[in-house]
Image (cartoon, rainbow, N blue to C red):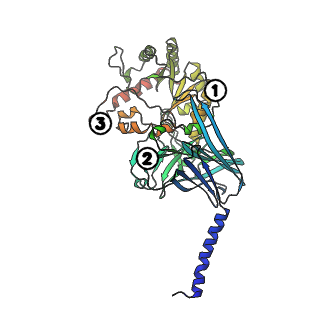
């Protein structure tokens, strides 16, 4: 039995804990931002840490989750912060789009801006279709971001459609794995975004990002309480394969994720919420959060349909002209131009292996048929050679299909902006292939007309990942991020039990031999 002294000795630490809690609560400041329709609440708590939670009606979707930025200087933006000022605003207008499924997009949100004495701000927005937050810093000079804390403590155990990433962070054409509960995901596995979670009701929650500039792309990683953000660290050494058809892979990485300006806006962390699956098909939140267009002249931007030979290995079974990958010559490409002209297709996409002389002659012929040419291109040439893109414009190309990126570290993300800006200045359209998911860059640079980052029908050549289930899922998940280069067009169909991928190895060898011969015929000078 405890005596009075024992009771006093026990009460002292309890009292200290209670006092600490009281002091925390006393200095904690709470703010709530509500969507225009009143269904979504973003609750922000500023105390020893900055946390947020999200409610949909009476249902808590995300329980208090910490957010912060850690710099290599030791400064942590989000730890023991003092609020200087707060401002709010409401925007209700419309965004006019240059092309796409909507000519006009309604933009209606409530916003809170919290300015801290540590020379940074946190901006929170609530839309009817989701919520978002971002850090904005005014630190001056240059900074190195060691890490970012972005946690998503999902209430309950929602199901998930999980596009699991590879360990090297070098592919976004990911298959979906469906789990009845996030607890079924193996520890520390991570996925590309957008990632979709399912609550009873049903209510769908997608974690994504927008307005990604000069910063690595975000993944979401499994934790004991939900998900957290994960980013590729800054590349330290990168392979130089000496072959423009190969990837530049990251070999070693630094112990930080970004080196950037101290005064800047960081990407939006986006949580999309929907109680109707059909609404996801027209959810443009990522686009709305992106920077408006910086391209003044958009007259050259004309999306359209394209003929293309790569998917079917250039095999034309019912045509008299010699076809197949062993016959990738000017006569065959002219046949594709004629086909495009006959059936009112605006473009021909010319895939890998061309030379400047070959492309010049094809562009000249296509112009006589009122068909424009999109030229497949290499990421390293598009970025490194200052004259390369200008030369493609000079020979008459309407745009470039830039491939072999397969990274989303800070360096690779900057590639995308540099190419988009160069092409905009030249009047070239861009299709990004072998690339990470879009994050609204196509709003800032509307000359970007498409992205891949999907398992298109080309995968039928080697596996069954582009299956009917996947076809029904990705419009609701991947397309939240933006348009996709899907590779449709097959008119042959079989049952799942009858399907067997049959890659044509000999055809592939023949194609690359053809490319090599074409290079040799012009003195190995692609430029």
Contact between labelled residues 2 and 1, with CB atoms less than 8 Å apart: no
Q: Residue at x 32, y 27 (%)?
A: 492
Q: Which SS class for mark 1?
A: helix
**How far from the left and from the top, in percent, is residue 164?**
44, 46
**How far from the left and from the top, in percent, is residue 4?**
58, 87
Outermost residue toward the top in this view:
368
**How far from the left and from the top, in percent, is residue 321?**
36, 14
**How far from the left and from the top, in percent, is residue 154?**
49, 54
Q: Nearer the viewer, residue 81 or 212?
A: 81
Q: Which residue is mark 1?
A: 425
Using the numbered discs, state the Cα–Cα distance from disc 1 to disc 2 in whole angstroms: 46 Å
- Give the vertical position of 7 relative to 156 (above or below): below
Residue 247 in view of the camera: no
Point out which mark residue 184 bears: none
Outermost residue toward the left in this view:
498
Q: Is residue 347 left or right of residue 462?
A: right
Of marks 2 and 3, the one in the foreground: 2
Q: Which residue is mark 3?
A: 496
Q: Which residue is mark 2?
A: 202
Q: Which SS class for mark 2?
A: loop
Instruction: State which tag comes first along the sequence, 2 or 3.
Output: 2
């Amino acid at each position: 039995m405890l005596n009075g002294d024992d009771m006093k000795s026990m009460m002292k630490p309890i009292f200290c804990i209670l006092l600490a809690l009281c002091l925390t609560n006393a200095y904690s400041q709470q703010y709530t931002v509500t969507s225009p329709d009143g269904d979504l609440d973003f609750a922000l708590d500023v105390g020893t840490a900055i946390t947020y939670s999200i409610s949909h009606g009476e249902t808590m979707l995300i329980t208090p989750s910490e957010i912060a930025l850690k710099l290599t200087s030791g400064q942590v933006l989000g730890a023991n912060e003092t609020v200087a000022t707060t401002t709010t605003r409401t925007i209700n207008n419309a965004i006019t789009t240059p092309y796409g499924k909507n000519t006009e997009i309604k933009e209606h949100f409530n916003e809170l801006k919290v300015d801290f004495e540590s020379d940074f701000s946190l901006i929170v927005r609530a839309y009817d279709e989701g919520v978002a937050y971002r850090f904005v810093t005014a630190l001056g000079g240059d900074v190195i971001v060691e890490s970012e804390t972005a946690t998503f403590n999902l209430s309950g155990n929602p199901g998930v459609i999980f596009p699991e990433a590879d360990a090297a962070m070098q592919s976004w054409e990911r298959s979906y794995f469906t789990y009845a509960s996030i607890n079924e995901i193996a520890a520390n596995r991570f996925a590309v975004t957008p990632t979709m979670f399912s609550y009873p009701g049903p209510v769908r929650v997608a974690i994504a990002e927008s307005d990604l500039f000069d910063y690595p792309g975000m993944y979401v990683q499994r934790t004991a309480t939900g998900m957290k953000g994960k980013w590729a660290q800054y590349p330290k050494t990168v392979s130089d394969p000496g072959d423009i058809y190969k990837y530049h892979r990251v070999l070693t990485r630094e112990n930080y994720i970004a080196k950037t300006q101290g005064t800047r806006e960081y990407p939006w962390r986006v949580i999309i919420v929907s109680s109707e699956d059909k609404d996801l098909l027209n959810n443009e939140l990522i686009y709305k959060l992106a920077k408006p267009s910086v391209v003044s002249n958009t007259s050259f931007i004309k999306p359209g349909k394209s003929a293309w030979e790569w998917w079917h290995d250039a095999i034309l079974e019912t045509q008299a002209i010699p076809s197949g990958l062993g016959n990738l010559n000017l006569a065959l490409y002219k046949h594709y131009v004629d086909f495009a002209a006959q059936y009112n297709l605006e473009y021909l996409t010319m895939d890998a292996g061309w030379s400047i002389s070959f492309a010049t002659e094809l562009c000249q012929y296509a112009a006589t048929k009122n068909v424009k040419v999109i030229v497949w291109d290499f990421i390293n040439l598009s970025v490194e050679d200052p004259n390369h893109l200008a030369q493609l414009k000079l020979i008459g190309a309407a745009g470039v299909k830039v491939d072999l990126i397969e990274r989303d570290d800070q360096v690779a993300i900057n590639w995308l902006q540099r190419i988009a800006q160069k092409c905009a200045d030249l009047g070239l359209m861009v299709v990004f292939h072998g690339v990470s998911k879009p994050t609204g860059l196509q709003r800032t640079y509307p000359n970007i007309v498409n992205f891949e980052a999907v398992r298109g029908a080309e995968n039928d050549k080697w596996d069954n990942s582009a299956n009917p289930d996947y076809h029904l899922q990705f419009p609701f998940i991947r397309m939240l991020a933006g348009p996709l280069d899907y590779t449709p067009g097959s008119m042959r169909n079989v049952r799942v039990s009858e399907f067997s991928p049959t890659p044509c190895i000999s055809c592939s060898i023949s194609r690359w031999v053809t490319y090599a011969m074409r290079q040799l015929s012009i003195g190995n000078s692609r430029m």
